[in-house]
Amino acid sequence: MSWRKEQRRAERGYHHGNLKEALLQAALGLIAEKGAAGFTFADAARMAGVSAAAPYRHFRDRDELLSSIAQRGFEQFEARLTAAWDDGRPDTVTAFERVGKAYLAFAREEPAFYNAMFESGVPVDANPALQAASERAFNIIRAAAERLAALSPPGTPRPPAMMMALHIWSMAHGVASLFSRGDAARRKLPMSPDELLEAEVLIYLRGLGFPTDRRPPAKGAEPPPVPPEASSGSGVPPGGPWGKPK
Amino acid sequence: MSWRKEQRRAERGYHHGNLKEALLQAALGLIAEKGAAGFTFADAARMAGVSAAAPYRHFRDRDELLSSIAQRGFEQFEARLTAAWDDGRPDTVTAFERVGKAYLAFAREEPAFYNAMFESGVPVDANPALQAASERAFNIIRAAAERLAALSPPGTPRPPAMMMALHIWSMAHGVASLFSRGDAARRKLPMSPDELLEAEVLIYLRGLGFPTDRRPPAKGAEPPPVPPEASSGSGVPPGGPWGKPK
DNA sequence: CGGCTCATGTAAAGATCGTTCACATGAGCT
DNA sequence: AGCTCATGTGAACGATCTTTACATGAGCCG
């Protein structure tokens, strides 16, 4: 350990050179391992090969580090949601579901970020930059909902896009938080979190009057309006959003 | 402080008499204030007027205290959900929505319990009693979903009750976690969390084919297929699940 | 090149916490 | 009365968070 320290110092000299970044990376790894609660400032410093006091040159305190990670997380989150949305291509509903999956994928693949963003107790409004990043990410969902709402079938009242966005967000967060991550996934499920969320969103969209069974792949097209399932959908398992009704 | 300590000791003698309970109460208060992460074993001891080592006579460690609180929380949670469900009276859909509201009410009114149960990082499967309590609570939702699924309108495949229960749980948890508690509630919303969840569940149920608009909207645009027990509405604002469509 | 300055890192120290251990107390039973 | 055991105390250890005084050296200016 002292050996490694000397080694490092030989490599980089007295000054680390990029300690701030190194600390963020170290913290990210630690949070992924032990959760935001278990992560310690001292550990991050040790992992970066510096003394316990060094991090205070770059972050006011432990919370500011956490807040920085959350902010960075929201930025990556936004990027992934944006890519998934792809401006609504090839069609709005398909893209919309892709956003839902991207949400879960992010929660699953970046547990450290997700933890810092939503479960670490970091108050979103503490840091304006953090709040802004959070809002930008949400705005992707919001924009998608906006487009979806505009497609609301004629004859039905058009749902407020903001409400739809909040609904989708809460579904995605609920599934991610309860079933899709780390030890929360210990709960035994009859289906994968992805399938669960997909079915949930499809049922929800159908509740708003959207035809959710687009594009039957092999069989002939289905005039979708009233018997909305009963045909094999593309992303939808046969038998509607919830597999074979037995 | 030493004064208070002597005072207390005068009141109760060397032995506290009910330290376990006092610790649970103290912890509950502390968690409500500062979150499960911020709560410390030593603080709880201090608040109960005993030394820092005393709690170890009643709890193996801090995690066991947290776990006990979570368990107790699940028990109260179950009681409230059971009361709200009221065995499906007066009709299944109404009772079902009451359960949703009870969920949110619990999250709002018992933030400490909710925090310990879902956000403290306590692994549910660590303690068998905890897991059992958790399952009992979920079984209320599950039973309600079962009854609801049995009412599934003819002509549509019957949704699996388990899936419905998981969907409802994830919606409720998502709304509670994102919007309905403590500093998470800082996010500005166009509607209350209760209304948000109610609309969400209604839309979802409609997506399953349930007639959710007891008391049809002003512009009757809904062809409610079969009203099994659709009678006088309650709780649903006129105009569909999201208020007046403008 | 020499020296100044300031960002960056270190060491030491105080405060708090989780946890353990040896010991004290006293409530209840015999 | 005396024994016993659950319950509480005090001291101690190691870890963490955070501050403070001091050390280092990179970059700049003359």
Image: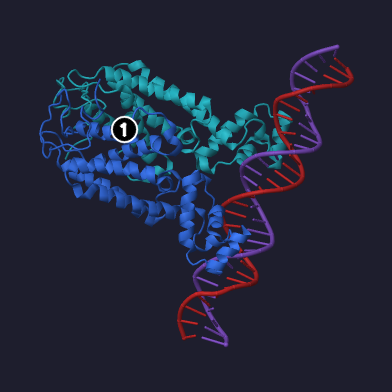
Chain colours: A cyan, B blue, C red, D purple
Q: Quadrant of the C terminus of chain A?
A: top left
| Quadrant in the picture for residue A78 | top left
**Of residues A151 and A235, the one drawn nearer to the viewer in this rendering:** A151
| Quadrant in the picture for residue A214 | top left
* Vertical arrangement, residue A155 with respect to residue B7, above or below: above
The residue at the point 41 percent across, 51 percent down is B70
| Residue A190 seen by the camera | no
A185 left or right of A206? right
Q: Which amino acid does the dot numbered 1 rest on? A: Leu
Give percent across and percent down for residue A210.
22, 23
Dot 1 crowding, Cα within 10 Å, few <14, some 14–19, many 20+: many
Give percent across and percent down for residue A171.
33, 33
**Of residues A88 and B179, the one drawn nearer to the viewer in this rendering:** B179
The residue at the point 52 percent across, 64 percent down is B57
Q: Quadrant of the N terminus of chain A?
A: top right
Give percent across and percent down for residue B32.
46, 46
Q: Which residue is mark 1?
A: B196
Badge 1: chain ID: B
Give percent across and percent down for residue B14.
56, 69
